[in-house]
Image (cartoon, helix red, strand yellow):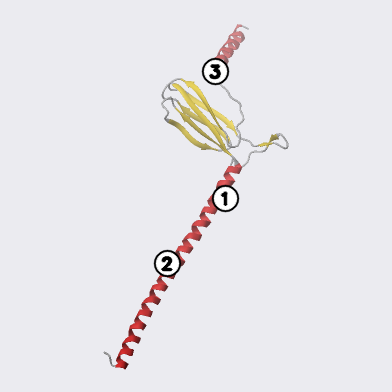
Amino acid sequence: MAALGEALRAAVAALLLLSWGAHGLYFHIGETEKRCFIEEIPDETMVIGNYRTQLWDKQSESFLPSTPGLGMHVEVKDPDGKVVLSRQYGSEGRFTFTSHTPGEHQICLHSNSTRMALFAGGKLYREERFRMTSESTNQRVLWWSIAQTIILILTGIWQMRHLKSFFEAKKLV
Protein backbone atom coordinates (compact mmCIF):
# COMPACT_ATOMS: atom_id res chain seq x y z
CA MET A 1 0.00 0.00 0.00
CA ALA A 2 2.88 2.36 0.82
CA ALA A 3 4.41 1.68 -2.62
CA LEU A 4 1.12 2.57 -4.34
CA GLY A 5 0.85 5.84 -2.36
CA GLU A 6 4.46 6.71 -3.18
CA ALA A 7 3.90 5.98 -6.90
CA LEU A 8 0.74 8.09 -6.88
CA ARG A 9 2.59 10.95 -5.19
CA ALA A 10 5.42 10.71 -7.77
CA ALA A 11 2.89 10.71 -10.64
CA VAL A 12 1.12 13.80 -9.25
CA ALA A 13 4.45 15.56 -8.73
CA ALA A 14 5.51 14.73 -12.32
CA LEU A 15 2.14 15.94 -13.64
CA LEU A 16 2.48 19.22 -11.71
CA LEU A 17 6.03 19.74 -12.98
CA LEU A 18 4.97 19.07 -16.58
CA SER A 19 1.94 21.34 -16.43
CA TRP A 20 3.87 24.13 -14.68
CA GLY A 21 5.90 25.06 -17.80
CA ALA A 22 3.13 24.53 -20.35
CA HIS A 23 0.72 27.14 -21.67
CA GLY A 24 -2.11 26.70 -24.10
CA LEU A 25 -4.10 29.07 -26.32
CA TYR A 26 -7.24 28.52 -28.31
CA PHE A 27 -8.31 31.27 -30.70
CA HIS A 28 -9.88 32.01 -34.06
CA ILE A 29 -8.18 33.98 -36.84
CA GLY A 30 -10.11 35.60 -39.66
CA GLU A 31 -9.24 35.02 -43.29
CA THR A 32 -6.87 37.97 -43.67
CA GLU A 33 -6.24 38.53 -39.98
CA LYS A 34 -2.84 38.28 -38.30
CA ARG A 35 -2.55 37.38 -34.61
CA CYS A 36 0.57 38.21 -32.62
CA PHE A 37 1.39 37.17 -29.07
CA ILE A 38 4.17 38.42 -26.86
CA GLU A 39 5.55 35.78 -24.53
CA GLU A 40 8.29 36.08 -21.92
CA ILE A 41 10.54 33.13 -22.74
CA PRO A 42 13.69 32.19 -20.79
CA ASP A 43 17.05 31.56 -22.43
CA GLU A 44 17.54 28.22 -24.27
CA THR A 45 13.88 27.19 -24.01
CA MET A 46 12.23 25.03 -26.66
CA VAL A 47 8.79 26.28 -27.63
CA ILE A 48 6.39 23.90 -29.37
CA GLY A 49 3.15 25.01 -30.97
CA ASN A 50 0.43 22.75 -32.33
CA TYR A 51 -2.23 24.18 -34.62
CA ARG A 52 -5.09 23.21 -36.91
CA THR A 53 -6.57 25.52 -39.53
CA GLN A 54 -10.15 25.16 -40.64
CA LEU A 55 -12.58 27.32 -42.56
CA TRP A 56 -15.73 28.46 -40.77
CA ASP A 57 -18.93 28.14 -42.77
CA LYS A 58 -21.25 31.00 -41.75
CA GLN A 59 -24.36 29.37 -43.23
CA SER A 60 -24.09 26.05 -41.41
CA GLU A 61 -22.23 27.62 -38.46
CA SER A 62 -19.70 24.81 -38.42
CA PHE A 63 -16.14 24.13 -39.50
CA LEU A 64 -15.56 22.79 -43.00
CA PRO A 65 -13.27 19.79 -43.53
CA SER A 66 -9.59 20.59 -44.07
CA THR A 67 -9.03 22.17 -47.48
CA PRO A 68 -5.93 21.69 -49.66
CA GLY A 69 -3.95 24.89 -49.99
CA LEU A 70 -5.04 26.11 -46.57
CA GLY A 71 -2.15 26.61 -44.18
CA MET A 72 -0.53 28.71 -41.51
CA HIS A 73 2.38 31.12 -41.68
CA VAL A 74 4.35 31.41 -38.42
CA GLU A 75 6.85 34.16 -37.69
CA VAL A 76 8.77 34.47 -34.42
CA LYS A 77 10.99 37.41 -33.44
CA ASP A 78 13.33 37.53 -30.47
CA PRO A 79 13.59 40.51 -28.06
CA ASP A 80 16.14 42.14 -30.39
CA GLY A 81 13.67 42.00 -33.30
CA LYS A 82 15.63 39.31 -35.16
CA VAL A 83 13.52 36.72 -36.98
CA VAL A 84 13.96 33.36 -35.25
CA LEU A 85 11.40 31.50 -37.38
CA SER A 86 9.48 32.46 -40.52
CA ARG A 87 7.88 29.55 -42.29
CA GLN A 88 4.76 28.42 -44.13
CA TYR A 89 3.13 25.27 -42.75
CA GLY A 90 0.29 23.03 -43.88
CA SER A 91 -3.27 23.01 -42.57
CA GLU A 92 -2.41 21.00 -39.48
CA GLY A 93 0.85 20.50 -37.67
CA ARG A 94 3.46 21.69 -35.23
CA PHE A 95 6.11 24.38 -35.16
CA THR A 96 9.09 24.51 -32.84
CA PHE A 97 11.85 26.97 -32.06
CA THR A 98 14.43 27.46 -29.34
CA SER A 99 14.98 30.83 -27.71
CA HIS A 100 18.63 31.85 -27.60
CA THR A 101 18.06 35.12 -25.75
CA PRO A 102 15.77 35.62 -22.75
CA GLY A 103 12.97 38.14 -22.98
CA GLU A 104 9.75 38.95 -24.77
CA HIS A 105 9.39 37.02 -28.01
CA GLN A 106 6.77 38.01 -30.58
CA ILE A 107 4.92 35.06 -32.15
CA CYS A 108 2.73 35.95 -35.13
CA LEU A 109 0.35 33.61 -36.96
CA HIS A 110 -1.76 34.18 -40.05
CA SER A 111 -3.53 31.86 -42.43
CA ASN A 112 -3.22 31.66 -46.18
CA SER A 113 -6.86 31.13 -46.94
CA THR A 114 -8.02 29.11 -49.92
CA ARG A 115 -9.60 32.16 -51.50
CA MET A 116 -6.29 33.99 -51.24
CA ALA A 117 -4.48 30.96 -52.68
CA LEU A 118 -6.95 30.81 -55.57
CA PHE A 119 -6.55 34.55 -56.11
CA ALA A 120 -2.75 34.17 -56.18
CA GLY A 121 -3.05 31.23 -58.60
CA GLY A 122 -5.30 33.27 -60.90
CA LYS A 123 -2.94 36.21 -60.68
CA LEU A 124 0.01 34.00 -61.68
CA TYR A 125 -1.98 32.62 -64.63
CA ARG A 126 -2.84 36.16 -65.81
CA GLU A 127 0.77 37.25 -65.43
CA GLU A 128 1.98 34.23 -67.46
CA ARG A 129 -0.60 34.88 -70.19
CA PHE A 130 0.33 38.58 -70.32
CA ARG A 131 4.04 37.69 -70.56
CA MET A 132 3.37 35.31 -73.47
CA THR A 133 1.27 37.97 -75.25
CA SER A 134 4.01 40.57 -74.72
CA GLU A 135 6.72 38.26 -76.07
CA SER A 136 4.59 37.40 -79.11
CA THR A 137 3.91 41.09 -79.81
CA ASN A 138 7.59 41.91 -79.38
CA GLN A 139 8.51 39.16 -81.88
CA ARG A 140 6.02 40.48 -84.46
CA VAL A 141 7.25 44.07 -84.06
CA LEU A 142 10.82 42.90 -84.59
CA TRP A 143 9.99 41.07 -87.84
CA TRP A 144 7.84 43.99 -89.08
CA SER A 145 10.71 46.44 -88.54
CA ILE A 146 13.13 44.11 -90.37
CA ALA A 147 10.65 43.86 -93.30
CA GLN A 148 10.28 47.67 -93.41
CA THR A 149 14.07 48.12 -93.47
CA ILE A 150 14.44 45.65 -96.36
CA ILE A 151 11.63 47.38 -98.30
CA LEU A 152 13.27 50.81 -97.77
CA ILE A 153 16.66 49.51 -98.96
CA LEU A 154 15.11 47.86 -102.05
CA THR A 155 13.13 51.04 -102.82
CA GLY A 156 16.33 53.12 -102.55
CA ILE A 157 18.21 50.77 -104.93
CA TRP A 158 15.32 50.83 -107.41
CA GLN A 159 15.15 54.66 -107.31
CA MET A 160 18.91 55.00 -107.90
CA ARG A 161 18.78 52.66 -110.91
CA HIS A 162 15.70 54.36 -112.30
CA LEU A 163 17.22 57.85 -111.95
CA LYS A 164 20.55 56.67 -113.45
CA SER A 165 18.78 55.22 -116.51
CA PHE A 166 16.63 58.40 -116.78
CA PHE A 167 19.67 60.68 -116.79
CA GLU A 168 21.51 58.41 -119.27
CA ALA A 169 18.50 58.55 -121.58
CA LYS A 170 18.42 62.35 -121.40
CA LYS A 171 22.23 62.38 -121.86
CA LEU A 172 22.81 64.47 -118.79
CA VAL A 173 25.41 62.06 -117.41
Q: Mark 3, residues whose alpha carbon is within 10 Å: few (<14), some, or many (≥20)?
A: few
Q: Depth-wise, is mark 1 or mark 2 nearer the camera?
A: 2
Determine the image quadrant of residue 169: bottom left
Q: Which residue type does callout 2 highlight?
A: Leu
Up/down of 137 relative to 48, above or below: below
Under circle 1, the secondary element is helix
Whether residue 68 is visible, yes or no, is no
Q: Residue at coordinates 47% horizontally, 29% vertically from top-left?
A: 97
Q: Which label number is shown at residue 79?
A: none
Q: Disc 2 on helix, strand or loop?
A: helix
Q: Which residue is mark 3?
A: 18
Q: Residue furthest right?
A: 60
Q: Which residue is mark 1?
A: 122
Q: CA distance from mark 1 to mark 3?
A: 48 Å
Q: Of discs 3 and 2, which sits in the foreground? A: 2
* Residue that sits furthest to the top in the current view: 2
| In the foreground, 60 or 98 | 60
Rendered residue at 44%/26% (across/down):
78
Closer to the chain start, of discs 1 and 3, is 3
Residue at position x 60%, y 37% from top?
31
Q: Which residue is mark 2?
A: 142
* Secondary structure type for disc 3: helix
Name which of mark 1 and mark 2 comes first in the sequence: 1
In the image, residue 11 sits, relative to residue 91, either above or below, namely above
Q: Nearer the viewer, residue 15 or 52?
A: 52
Whole-number angstrom distance, CA of label 3 to CA of label 2 = 72 Å
